[in-house]
Structure formats: C-alpha cells, structure tokens
Image (cartoon, grey):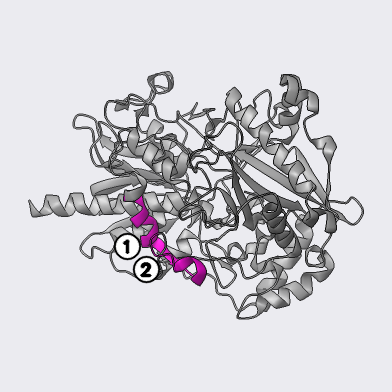
Amino acid sequence: MNGTCMAVSPLQTLITLVTSLINTQTPEDLNSPLQLLNGATFDFIIVGGGSAGCVLANRLSEIQNWSILLLEAGGEEPFEADVPGFLGYSYDTRMNWQFETVPEEIICGGKSCPVVRGKGLGGSSDINAMLYVRGNKLDYDNWAHLGNTGWDFKNVLPYFKKSENNLDPDISKDTKYHSTGGYLSVGRFPYQDTAVQNLSAAFNEIGFKYVDFNAEKQTGIMISQVTQENGERFSSNRAFLKPIRKRQNIKVVTNIRITKILIEPKTKTAYGIEYVGEKNQKIHNKVYASKEVILSSGAVGSPVLLMRSGIGPKDVLDVLGIKAIKYLDVGRNLQDHATVPGSYYMIRKYEDTQVTNLLMNSILYSRPKRQGPWSATGTTQVVAFAKTKYASQNIDYPDIGIYFLIDAASKENELNKLNFIPTVLRPKSRGKITINSTDPFSPPLIYPNYFSHPYDIKVHLESYKIAEELANTTSFKLANYKLNVSALPTEEYFKTGNNSEWRDLANFRLFSIFHLSGTCKMGPSNDTSAVVDPTLKVHGVKQLRVIDASIMPHLVSGNINAPTMMIAEKGADMIKKFWIKTFKK
C-alpha cells in the first residue's frame, strides 16, 4: 500500500540530499550479457526476479551441480528503494510496471485505476510498505481443504520460519512461530512518531488487544514487524539474491523481456524460453532448460506469459490465433484487497513531516545507525485486524484489516489527513486478467471487478463504525484528532443500503492495496478452474511450474509479500525433492 504522500519536487530533493550524505555504491554489474545467452542451456530457468524469484534462485543454486538462470524485465534495485521514508515515490518510476485496469463503471470515476507492480530485482518487495504479515492459519487450512495436500498451516509454517531472521527479542522468543538466522530480516522500525503512538493507544481504548498477528492470534492491534534491518528496507533481492550473486552456478540477467515459453507440442514439455532485450526488441533469441522452466512473474506477468505461450482459456487463445498447448482457466480468479477510505481524521502537522525539516531528518538517517522519520513509514506500520458482525465470533478469523495513511500533502491550514483505510480480508468478488494481442510489449487487460459481490460492500461498510469509535477515544480527543463525518456514508445508507450512495463513494475514493493474486490457481486435477497442481506444476504440461502469488486459491487475510516468499521456499523444496529423487532412481 502507499506511504506518506509528498510533493514530488521536495522528495526528489530529499533523495539527492540523502544519497549525498550516505556512502552508497551502485550495485555491481554481475549480469550476463544478453548475447551470450542465445542457445545456452541451464538446468532451471526462473522467469521473474521478484519476491518469489529471488528466493528460488537462492535455494536452487544451493545444489552446486545445478545451473540456474534468473531473468528479470527490470533493472537492479536502486539505492532509494532502501529508504523506508521514500515509500510511494517509486510508484511513478521505472521500478513500477505502470499497469492500469480496464475502465469500469463504478471505480476511479469510470476511468482506469493504477495497478502498482514492482519491476526490477526484488519486484514488489522493492516498493511495498514492507509489512510482514503471514495471514491467518485458517487461510492455509482452507487451501488444503480444497485438495491442496501439504498446504495447511502446520505444513507451511516451517517455510515462514526458514526465511526468517527475527530481530525483536520479545517476538523471536516465541520459537513455535518465529526463528532467527534466516536470510530475511524482520523487525519493527526504529522510529514511531506521535501519530503511531496515538493510534495504538486509541485502539487499546476500544478493546483491541496488542497481539503478534503472525503467531497464535490475529485479531487485534500491532505496530507491525516489517522487512527491514537498521532502518533500511530488506527486499527479497537484498535478503536472498545479493548474498549469493557470486555463486558460480547462477546467472542473473536484467532488462530482458520473455516473449514466450518454448513447449514441445506433442509431448507438452517445456524446454526453454524465447526473449528479447527491453531496449532491442527486434532480435528474438532462445535459451534452454534441461529440467524446468519456472514462472515467478507475479499475478499479472505469469498468466500473461502462459497465455502467449498457448496455455489459457479457449476463447482467448482461439481469438488471437495462438496455437493451443493446453486449455486452462489462466487469468481467472483474480483477487485483490481494495478499499474505499470513506473517512479520515484531521490532525496537526508534526514537525517530522514538514519539508523544512528535511535536512535534519536526512542527517539523522545518514548515521550508521539509521534514525529519524526516514527510517520508518509513519502510520502505515500500525495494522489492526477486526471482526464485523458478519464474521464468526467463535473463532479467530477477522474479516477486516485496517491500515492508516497520512496525506502530508494536505494544504488545509496546518493540518494533515490521517486516512482510515479498511479492507475486506477475504473478498468474494473475482476479476480476471487477459490479453488482446500477441505482442509481448502490449499491456495486459486487467478487470478487477472490485466490490461486484454484495458481501464485500456490506462488510466494508461495517468497518466505518470503528472509525467513529476511534474518534471518541480519549487518546484522539487529547490529540485533537477530528473525524471528517461528511466522508462517511450517511445513517440512511446503513438503514436502507442505498446503492447509489455507495456507488458515488466508491467511484471517486476506491483504490487498490495491490495484493493481486489467484490468477494461476492451485488445485487438484479434478478442479476444472485450477492451473497448477499442489506441487505447482502446470496441469497437463511437463517441466513447467508457476511459483508466485498467482497460485493462491484464495487471497490470504493480510499482506501477500511474506506468503509469496513462503510459497517460493516450499516450491524450491518440492523441486529439490523431485529432481534429487529422480536422479537417484
């Protein structure tokens, strides 16, 4: 989700200032030249160097006699991605694919909505809010209940722990759920401002207990742990790829566009990929995989590449004249966390959010031990999970997630907007991603279908009652936080369910929290909507897997970065077991 909003020009000034104060190095160019790839053969080709791809590259290259090729359309992760306080800046840069939705009547004023997806080594973990949220135990038990053996919480927990290097002693001591020594550093930010403290106290007043929502209970309030160390972002690239870039059995290539997967039509066996350079788009080359091609291009990229390679819905492939390898429901089942922030609080501007303090805050951040507001993301680190009246009250399975975002660009006197951002954790609305061109550089068609199911609307509206409860707390009154009541749906709506009022509200306020998933759904062979099986192999195609957020049958109850890395950890283990067992035979 987005971070503190600032005018671009002061933020660009800040980036220049901070980079001049900190001793930084441009990432070493360890990439293999594109021209040397043509005709080469590797054991495994990983398409996509994002949250999942970096994990896979690390774990598969642990087998020294395996050769690994990691391909990424974007470039190296730039320095500015490391600074938590720059959150949101990268949305308008080369680090974002700049996707857009197909215009839909009730959202974004009938125009296209932005779809933020990370581009570059680290993927969306370079530009997200860094929140380390695993989801609810029942999410994974439900995956298993759908026929995905081995994906229940008991079986996925070891893979969360395998990655984890938990830096907070009060959390890491719970060894049932947490661990230390993994590649991924996880801990609270070193800085919490006054607004963070006020939010935490207010939630406690209205009955929310402080919890570690990655442990026994999820319902409650937490100043979230995040993927950071010493006040710096710990992306998947920084955690998993950078430490092993010099292994002799791994090649990393950036700024490369995969045009299609090479699949032998008679045996339906994947044996490589075709590619072009991001800049030189005319020369098509090929590189081969002797064991597997693995797609880790995310909930947008993976289904698009499958469809352009002949794996997808019949109506899409036939219309475009793409020779079918396998008809599967690729691109369907799109899920996301969206929000209609119908309320906000007016709060006074704290000194650490004012542009006049950029120099002091930059100096604080430039110290070896990062300090000050640029070592954190403000109120985005406060996360609550709640139950509305529509949730089961007998189990720990909240149906609403609540986030906060300060709009520091507000010009209303000396006040900022503190936005109350609720989201339905398990939406029933489903969208789709498809293509209308075989051109690998043409954008995908994204139909999110937000709030098309009435359940999502009624649960979302219930969350506004929490906004009013917070406004009445002593903590908020002492801080003089004022709820903007005009932004809330009226009492008439709650009584009558006036759809026109909801449509007006959603049309101009709705935005995505960018947790796209589900478009290459995991399921057993008797699930006609499934794209991959529980071992993440594409149904009906040999030597081809999808390992990323697109395989989620149902969206998890929280942010998706940690679950995506877990999927990659588990996927890597399944690959190792399959090929090592096969070799022994």
Q: Which mark is residue 244?
A: 2
Q: In this view, does 422 lie above or below 165?
A: above
**Residue matched to label 1:** 250
Q: Is residue 41 visible?
A: no
Q: Where is residue 170 in the image (x, y as percent from the top left)?
A: 51, 69
Q: Which of marks 1 and 2 is nearer the N terminus?
A: 2
In what element is the residue under mark 2? helix
Q: Are marks 1 and 2 in contact (CB under 8 Å)?
A: yes
Residue 282 position within the rendered picture, expressed as x and y whole percent measured from the top left: 45, 43
Residue 537 in the image, given as x and y percentages of width and height: 28, 39
Category of crowding for the residue at label 2, using alpha-carbon neighbours closer than 10 angstroms: few (below 14), some (14–19), many (at least 20)? some
What's the residue type where badge 2 is placed? Ile
For the record, the magenta segment spans 155-176
- At 56% across and 38% down in the image, what residue appears? 399
Residue ranking furthest to the bottom: 368
Is 335 colored magenta in this rendering?
Answer: no
Percent coordinates x, y for residue 180 in the rendering: 41, 69
Say above or below: 83 vs 546.
below
